[in-house]
Image: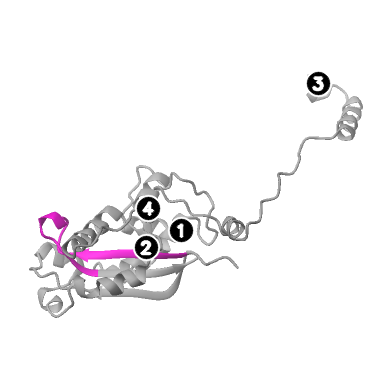
Amino acid sequence: MPKPLREIVLDTETTGLDPAKGDRMVEIGCIELINHMPSGTTFQRYLNPERDMPAAAFAVHGLSNEFLAGKPLFAEVADDFFGFVGSDPLIIHNAAFDLGFIDAELVRLGRPPLARDAVVDTLLIARRKFPGAPASLDALCRRFAVDSSTRDVHGALLDAQLLAEVYLALIGGRQPGLGLNADDGGAVVQPAAASASAETGSHARPPRPHAPDPAEIEAHTMFIDGLKDPLWRR
């Protein structure tokens, strides 16, 4: 049997918008997908940012200095995080933002940045599918009728759960592969049948011939001859 497709939906919460200016991650949340569907396996950690929490950031996610003070540093959970993610594709909304913060932590640890070749950015997919339309996670939840009523504040795990549903809708619901191409944010989602063929070495059937054979042409001509002023001969 073909190996199931495993993907990781990822989201973070931070102290601000720019890791180059000292902003840090305060939460990381991941949802495991198997063949595009949530498996029920998750990874979530709150993180001590080793700095104060700006009021604007607190208003977004509600994570206070006091709450985060006793949480682990990213360095303490890094191995668990990378063990969970492995080498499987990452599904991220506005990937440059989250990856920028993760890479900043990796620099502090003297580790290389995350590879970008296995990252699917749902923001880019949404912008290509719905040009000119709002493409925030909230807007996509409204578009696809994903229930976000429990989202009083942002949370990495909660947002990853919502994004998992949005991602499924973006790639064609429960029939992945429909309407997908390489222009969808650089993400190519291979249909299950194509994956199976690649795994087993089988080949697709040759296309069926649709041109009429001589007998069909003759029968059609006789039919036309029996009509008065046929449209086909005007």
Q: Nearer the viewer, mark 4 or mark 3?
A: 4
Q: CA distance from mark 4 to mark 2?
A: 20 Å
Quadrant hosting residue 161? bottom left
Q: CA distance from mark 3 to mark 2?
A: 57 Å
Going by the numbered disc 1, the residue's amino acid type is Ala
Q: Which residue is mark 1?
A: 169
Which secondary structure, mark 4? loop
Q: CA distance from mark 4 to mark 3?
A: 57 Å
Does label 3 or label 1 sit earlier along the sequence?
1
What percent of the width, then of the height, locates residue 100?
23, 56
Q: CA distance from mark 1 to mark 4?
A: 22 Å
Up/down of 234 relative to 75, above or below: above
Residues packed near mark 4 inside 10 Å, few (<14), some (14 to 19) or many (20 plus): few
Q: Which residue is mark 2?
A: 163
Does label 4 or label 3 sit earlier along the sequence?
4
Q: Is residue 54 left or right of residue 226?
A: left
Going by the numbered disc 4, the residue's amino acid type is Asp
- Give the magenta range: 6-27
Q: Which residue is mark 4?
A: 117
Q: Is residue 137 visible?
A: yes
